[in-house]
Amino acid sequence: MQLQAHLKQLLSLDDDRFTATGTQTVCFVDMPAKKLLEHFKDWQGQAGWEKLGRDWVCSNQERNVSFYVRAIAPSAALLISTVKTLHNKYLTRFGGGVVDENINEQQLRYLNAYGRILNQADYIDGVSPEGEVLAKLGLICTVYFRKGGQRDMGYKVLGCFDRFVEQFGPHLKGQFHDFSRRGFTSLRKDSITKAKEKLSGLVDEGTLFFWVLQSERNGELPAEYAIQAMTCNIDHDSEWLSYLKITLPWQLLEEADGEWQFKDWVRYLCETLDVDQGYAGLACNLPYDYHQFQPYEFQMAQRYSGLMVDSAPYLDKAALEDGIKGVNWLTLLGPRYIEKLGGMAALKQQLQLPDVSVQETDNGRLMIQAGVLPDVGAQEDGHPPAYVAVNRVLKSVRVPHPDQLHTGMDDAEGFTKANTLAWYARFDEVEKAYEAHEPAR
C-alpha cells in the first residue's frame, strides 16, 4: 500500500475526482491504455466513458463502481477503481493487479519521468480560440555537421530523408524545397522522388540546398512529423556548418520500442553525418511560418527549462561555429569538443554522474543522456538535476557569444539579446547554489 501511495503521489493523482467514501485501489495494468479501454467497452453500461483532459473516467451507478484510466508508460496504464465493495474480478478480468514490490526502482523512475511529461503536455500545447493547435510539444533532434557541400555528404543527407520517408511516409503531407515556386506543396505520387532528383543536381554542383518534408500540407500549423536540412556551398565547407533536424510526436515514448526508436535515429544521424554537435529532447514546436508564434515559444521556455528553443536552427549556424548550444536530454559531441574537454576517457570519467549515461558511437561521437526520459523542467519541479549535472561538465565549451534566439524582438515578448544569454545560462545558477552547499574538501 505504501508503494501505491508513492506512485499516486508521483503522478499527481490527488485531485478531487478521486476523493470518495468507498474503497480506492491504485492498480498497475500491464497493457496499453487504449487496449485497456477496449476491454471495458462491453462493461460500460449506460454511463459510458467521459474524456477529462488527458484522462478517461467511467462510472456505473448500478454496479457502484467507477474507473479512471491514464497511460503512464509504453504498454502500461494506471487504473484507479473506486467501489463500495471491491470485487477482484474487476481487476483480474483486465489483466491487472495491485502495484506491489514486483515493480522495481527503474520502472518507478520511468513512470515518474513519463508522468512529468504527461502532466505538462496539455499546458505546453498552444491552442487558438478556434481550436487549432498552433504550438505543440514534440521530440526533436538537431545535428550540425561539416562538409555539407561535399558530394558524398550531400547524398548522405538525402539518404536521411529516404530513411525518414521509409519509416514515417504515411504521415507526410507537404514539402518545401529550393525549387518550390509557391511555398509548400502537397505531396502527390512521385513528388518526393522528383524533388530528390532536382536536389541531387544541386548536390552534384556543390551548391547548398534546403528541403522540408512534414505532416502538414502548409506552414501554418506545427507538424508532428518532419525532417528538414540545410547544407552549405562547397566553397564554404571549411567554415560553415550544415544542419539536419527531425521532429516526432512525444507520444512515441508510449510505444514499447519508442524510446529505442528515437535514440536509434539519433545514433544513425551521428554516425551518418559525422556530427560536430547536436541535441535531442523535448521542444515547443512551432509552424514552419514561425515568426508570429515566437512569443509563445519564449513564454514556454521561461516556464519549462527542459524545452529546447529550436524554432529556427539555421539562425544558430554561425554562432555554433564556436561552441555548443547547451545540454538537453541527449547532448551530442564531435571530436573537437571531446578533445577540448580532455579527451574521450577523461570526459567519460567526468560524466560518471547520477542518472547520466554515455554512449560512444562507431565514428567517435559521444551521446550523453541526462535522465531516463526527457524532462520538460517545469518551474514547480525545478531544473532537471541530470541536465544541471551535465551542464556543469560541458559549460566550458558552450557558445560564448550566442546569436539572438528570436528575430525582430525588441521587447520582453520574445528572446532579445539579453534574455537569450540568460536562457543559455539557465542551469548555471543552480550549479552555483549546488557548489555553495557542497561540503569543503
Image (spheres, rainbow, N blue to C red):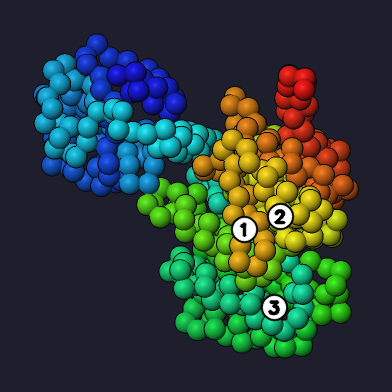
Q: Which residue is labeled 2 in the image?
A: 344
Tell me if 264 is positioned left or right of 33 in this view: right
Tell me if 248 is positioned left or right of 241 in this view: left
Residue 43 x, y percent position in the rendering:
13, 37
In whole angstroms, how far apart are the C-alphas of marks 2 and 1? 9 Å
| The quadrant where residue 54 appears | top left
Identified at 79% across, 60% down, the residue is 336
State the SS at label 2.
helix
Q: Which residue is labeled 1 in the image?
A: 360
State the SS at label 1.
strand
The amino acid type found where label 2 is placed reads: Met
Q: Is residue 316 visible?
A: no
What is the quadrant of the C terminus in the image? top right
Please tell me how crowded label 3 is: few (under 14), some (14-19), or many (20+) other residues with Cα within 10 Å: some
> Marks 1 and 2: in contact by CB < 8 Å?
yes
Say which label, 2 or 1, has the lower sequence index: 2
| The quadrant where residue 70 appears | top left
Residue 248 x, y percent position in the rendering:
52, 56
Judged by depth in the image, the label closer to the viewer, 3 or 2, is 2
- Near-viewer residue (199 or 128): 199
The amino acid type found where label 3 is placed reads: Met
| On screen, residue 221 above or below 75 | below
- Near-viewer residue (330 or 209): 330
Judged by depth in the image, the label closer to the viewer, 1 or 3, is 1
| On screen, residue 400 above or below 91 | below
In whole angstroms, how far apart are the C-alphas of marks 1 and 3? 22 Å
Q: Which residue is labeled 3 in the image?
A: 153
| The quadrant where residue 10 appears | top left
